[in-house]
Image: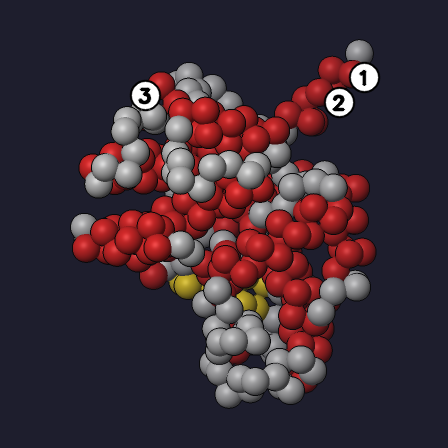
Amino acid sequence: MNEITKAFEKWLIEDGKAAATVGSYINDVCKFNAFLVEKDCDPEELLSRFYFTSYMKHLESEGMSVSTRNKKVNSLKVYNDWLFKNRMVDDIFISIKKDKVKIAHGSEAEVSVLNDQQVEQFLFYLERETQRNKLIGYLLLYTGIRVSELVNIKISDVDQLTSHLTVRGKGGKIREIPLRKDVLEAIHVYLRGERGNGKFPESPFLLVSQRAEKMHRDSVRRWLDETGRHLGFHIHPHKLRHTFCTRLIRSGVEISTVSKLAGHAGINMTVKYYINTSKEEKQNAVDLL
């Protein structure tokens, strides 16, 4: 994180933004900056209309969902306003009204998911990964938890006897998610192997890093980004969450059960995002004609 991003983070905190909001804004800004570095842009030019629109086109080409892209528009708009206020850029380049992707009222909400072939590729890839990374992949794919929930799992949250995971979600809501045998086995192997022999064996958190007794969610995102580049398709934590919910619905699981497992505030949210088929499924259906 460069000095300008750190100053932006300090301002967000002083402005009273919630910790999760600050983390989300900073993550979005850092990814935008990484894009500019990758494109070898002028480091003195922090933001421009061209840079912004190029980045949004890049996200769309990567298959990022409309809701996620709109969240990034919001984050970068706040960043743009702050830069302009502090005279680091000479204009407001981003407009929420103009730049957010609009979905007409009543339109289908579509999510980006891994197809069956991509799920299989991902699982085979995990077999060559470290014990910890394999476990991360299993937990995201087979429980549908959010990345913020993932890094906060404590060892005591895993009940080996009942094969359940206790998850603390948004607003402090607690839910229980059943664990598959292979997920329990991955937990067992990790705790007895890498985790038990690592630098932080006494940490209460399930997932630890080489530097800290609690893994950071950005580390998870970076690993998934690298994995996606290796496999040739985009992977991020929420895409695995969407995949989990979509696969349950395809398997005939009641929408109310999916809603509870996902920790949604209400069933309407589940219906909005998961009752509709993906773009790929609809294309395949038309191709059959």
- Eye-nearest disc, 2 or 3: 3
Task: Name the residue tied to disc 3.
Answer: 97
Task: Name the residue tied to disc 2.
Answer: 284
Crowd rating for badge 3 (residues with CA inside 10 Å; few <14, some 14–19, many 20+): few
In the rendered image, which quarter is residue 152 located in?
bottom left
Query: Are discs 2 and 3 less than 8 Å apart at CB?
Result: no
Residue 189 on image: x %, y %: 71, 78
Where the C terminus falls, by quadrant? top right
Crowd rating for badge 2 (residues with CA inside 10 Å; few <14, some 14–19, many 20+): few
Residue that appears at 54% across and 61% down? 219
Image position of 226 (left or right of 26): right
Which amino acid does the dot numbered 2 rest on?
A: Asn
Q: Does any portion of residue 14 appear in the rendered image?
A: yes
Q: Measure the C-alpha gap from mark 3 to mark 1.
A: 39 Å
Residue 223 on image: x %, y %: 62, 57
Q: Measure the C-alpha gap from mark 2 to mark 3.
A: 34 Å
Image position of 23 (left or right of 278): left
Q: How many marks?
A: 3
Answer above or below: position of 238 versus 68: below
Residue 256 on image: x %, y %: 50, 44
Which amino acid does the dot numbered 3 rest on?
A: Lys
